[in-house]
Image (spheres, grey):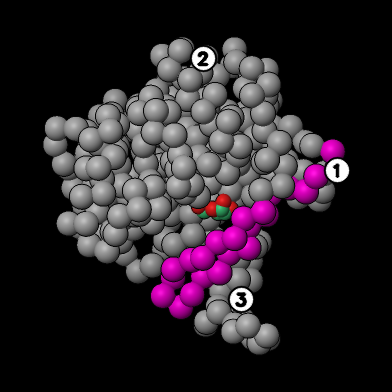
Amino acid sequence: MDIAVIGSNMVDLITYIDRMPKLGETLEAPRFSIGCGGKGANQAVAAAKLGSDVMMLTKVGDDLFAENTLKNFQRYGINTDYVVAVKGVSSGVAPIFVDKSSQNSILIIKGANNNLSIEDIEHAADAIKKCKLIILQLEIPLSVVYYAIDFGAKNNIPVILNPAPAVPNLDINYVCKCDFFMPNETELEILTGLPVSNLEEILVAANLLISKGLKNLIVTLGEKGAVWLDGKDIHHISPYRVNAIDTSGAGDAFIGCFAHYLVKTHDILKSLNMASAFSAYSVTGQGTQVSYPDKTQFDNFMSKL
Ligand code: RIB
């Protein structure tokens, strides 16, 4: 197995809007779609679509959505031995609003994702130990994220932590144990309490985190690409210019693709450049996972650049 994703799955309820309704207002929106999402699941699917062997450790609810989520993982060849249903709890759900400029706002109801536990990691320990990389996000209990970070460190498995959605009180000692810490600029702002309205400010905030002892900090910047700080150098990852339709799940596309190429090539810079292209492709289609290209589509896209 290449990659273990220990994280969330959600059902994305995506409404395409002209504008948000005001308080007390009822407003018609032009379009709606439903799809499989959740930051953990999205990252797993992105890597699997590119050809990685991925196992998913997650919890689904006691409802109609659960079976569909399971089938969706299986459709992409993701190992579901550790996808467990929780009785009497709803699946994770994410109402998403995408505006006319393709930007998204997301609410999450964690549901069964809140039930993922340290015992679940222990139960899957032998399988996780066979993986070359662990990916984590913050849509599951923080105690489980911390346990997984220690698990990776103890077993010499590199860990990517995507601190999304951001929590201001994330324990920096655990963050420093991760091999790759990958916030977007909004998450960087919440984590540091510093402004991030331009590249200069972003680098000040990023350097504050690096000064605490992080190994690799990668800040994803949407249409502006990404920056990678490793304590010595600052690398700028160029964006790929595309006609964006829906940016939902683009950050997850970036992380899943980065993970795939990192495991295959061990070349961080190359993996980041591929991730930038992959996430650019993803914003040209609607939805989250369904907008990610498979290996053939991605190779085709890259050959035309
Ligand atoms: O990052 C995008 C994802 O965030 C969506 O798929 C939604 O489910 C939320 O988890």
Magenta: main secondary structure: loop
Please state which of the two labelled residues, at mark 2 or mark 1, is closer to the viewer: 1
Which residues fall within the magenta stretch? 87-109
Circle 3 SS class: strand
Q: Which residue is mark 2?
A: 130
Q: Position of residue 278 (x, y in %)?
A: 37, 49
Q: Amino acid at mark 3?
A: Arg
Number of the label disc, if any, that sits on residue 88: 1
Q: Nearer the viewer, residue 101 or 171?
A: 171
Above-or-below relation of 59 to 279: above
For residue 33, say whether it is visible: yes
Could you tell whether 198 is left or right of 43 in the image? left
Above-or-below relation of 84 to 34: above
Which mark is first along the chain, 3 or 1? 3
Q: Nearer the viewer, residue 174 or 19?
A: 174
Above-or-below relation of 205 to 97: above
Q: Quadrant of the C terminus?
A: bottom left
State the CA–CA distance, disc 2 to disc 3.
43 Å
Q: Position of residue 10 (x, y in %)?
A: 64, 49
Q: Amino acid at mark 2?
A: Lys
Q: Nearer the viewer, residue 272 or 187?
A: 187
**Residue visible at 45% across and 39% down?**
170
In which quarter of the view is residue 123 placed? top right
Q: Amino acid at mark 1?
A: Gly
**Label 2 close to label 3 by CB (< 8 Å):** no
Q: Position of residue 19 (x, y in %)?
A: 52, 82
Number of residues whose C-alpha sits closer than 10 Å to that of mark 3, classed few (under 14), some (14–19) or many (20 or more): few
Please state which of the two labelled residues, at mark 1 or mark 3, is closer to the viewer: 1
Number of the label disc, if any, that sits on residue 103: none
